[in-house]
Amino acid sequence: MIGSTIGTWEHIFGTDHLGRDYLSRLIYGSRISLLIGIGAALISGIIGTFLGVMAGYFGGRVDMVVTFLITVRLSMPVVLVALAVVAIVGGSLQVVIGVLGLLLWDRFAVVMRSSTLQIRSMDYVTAARAVGCSTTRILMTEVMPNVVNNLIVIATLEIAHAIILEAALSFLGLGVQPPLPSWGLMVSEGKDMMLFEPWLITIPGVALFALVLSVNLLGDGMRDVTAPENRN
Amino acid sequence: MISYALKRSILAILVALTVSMISFSLLYISSDPAIAMAGETASDADIEAIRELYGFDRPIVVQYWEWLKKAASGDLGKSYYFRTDVSHLIAERLPTTMTLGLCAIIFAIGLAVPLGVASAIRPNSIIDRVSLFLSVMGQALPSFWFALILIVLFSVNLRWLPVSGSDTWQHFIMPTIVLGYYAAPAIMRLTRTGMLEVLSTDYIRTARAKGLRPPVVLFKHALRNAIIPVVSLAAVQFGFMLGGSIVVETIFALHGAGFLAWESITRNDLPTVQGLILAFSLFYIILTLIADLINAWLDPRIRIG
């Protein structure tokens, strides 16, 4: 029966309101969530790390400008701006990744800045400068390897953040467009029938919950592994 | 203190201006306001006429300056859809959102701080494990899904609470829970860490050695010091709730500013969207300014930095 979540051997989780197999949409939906999560985290990671390291290493005016930019970005209502841009430009996978990537860099910048500030005062950086290393070389070989631990932890957290945001945007209709099987879209499509077929919204929701939980736990685990307390 | 307050206030104004500049350019460059106003079936001549009448063919900087001058005197333009002043629209809807946000942050604090304190008093006990478990679960739960599940559970099956609308206080219960639970884990963890730190300090040991009763030690001395960073965090989370209110209010059909945002975005109502972005960001900026000033007043070391 179309639109029913009664399982048959042909459709293990049943079908959605258009007769498409639910389980395969669920599986392909994970591709979308992960793509958007990792893509957005990559873009915002590059932006945020660049800004943060520059601010932390060079200090002074650069630091002032970057801190001002971070404050401006923090004061912008992210959901509102993301919704508005997607509504105007049109929703698609690339647009969502781009918008989320351009909006979620603040935590990267803040953490990278404070880590770089710590590293800059270390003796090995002073030694490298005394030896005559160029700034680029110092940044690449001394600063980056030491901030990479924090970077990975923040990256996993931002992946989870981007996944939840994309699901919320798609749920409101202003994210990924049908017929792409985004889990947020599946919940929104199912909510018209949710009183009769509650599984239609439960299943993608549980999938989202499980994915975000796993990514969060991964980030927590990485934090525990890379934290200095655990080094002998 | 005065010079710190002055410096922070000027910074706040600059930030607000920059945010409005960015959002103005985003909105008016990436879409054509003449088309948005005229509608989709208008002819080219009509669109040109509107463009000239409202000055959309002028350079973007000039348009922004005009908007800014009007905004400074409280005129945020007319909504394309509702045909009323944007400032009136926002002023009408904002109280509902404020009420919701306030209830949500009180709910979050009421849930998180006691759990955090209890976990800190007995670390690694069952209450500690349960609170950490709940906080991890809470951060992974998508809010829109949680809202739908609550609706199915409480409104349809149990019939305890109404589904949507904003008439009575019962209408606010589920939205409060949905909006508030997301802020609770961070507050709980911060309270727990802060309390753990404070409880191992010398002055607490002195208080206990003096023979003060445990509740007095706990609340009058320990919690008071541990709560300072939590105040900042709570203010920041309150600011974020405006963003979260868009989803929550749309699902529960609460007539607040978040719902207005969704309505105007889906209808390409640019003046309202621009006005809302300004209102939301101003709110957040003022909130963090107040939180910073309170912090500086509580902790004199901050004023020197």
Image (cartoon, coloured by chain):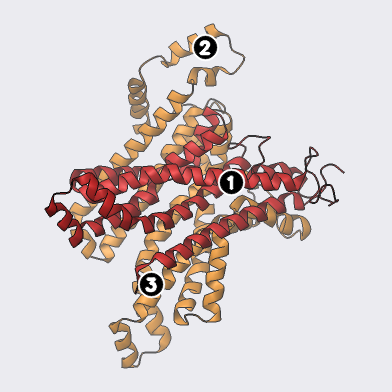
**In the image, what residue type sits under mark 3?**
Asn
Badge 2 density bin: few <14, some 14–19, many ≥20, Cα 10 Å: many
Labelled disc at residue B47: 2
State which tag comes first along the sequence, 1 or 3. Answer: 1
> Marks 2 and 3: in contact by CB < 8 Å?
no
The chain holding disc 2 is B
**Tag count:** 3
* Rendered location of residue A117, percent (x, y): 25, 56
Which of the pair B263/A203 is nearer the observer?
A203
Residue at the disc numbered 1: A33
Distance from the alpha carbon under mark 2 to that under mark 1: 40 Å
SS assignment at label 2: helix
Residue, x 40% and y 81% (percent of image)?
B218
Q: Quadrant of residue B24?
A: top left
From the viewer's perspective, is A167 left or right of B117? right
Q: Nearer the viewer, mark 3 or mark 2?
A: 3
SS assignment at label 1: helix
The chain holding disc 3 is A
* Chain letter of the orange region: B
Residue, x 72% and y 59% (percent of image)?
B154
Residue at the disc numbered 3: A230
Residue closest to the far right:
A1
The chain holding disc 1 is A
Residue, x 49% and y 56% (percent of image)?
B102
From the viewer's perspective, is B99 left or right of B11? right
Q: Quadrant of residue A192?
A: top right
Badge 3 density bin: few <14, some 14–19, many ≥20, Cα 10 Å: few
Q: Colour of chain A?
A: red
Distance from the alpha carbon under mark 3 to that under mark 2: 66 Å
* Rendered location of residue A226, percent (x, y): 40, 65
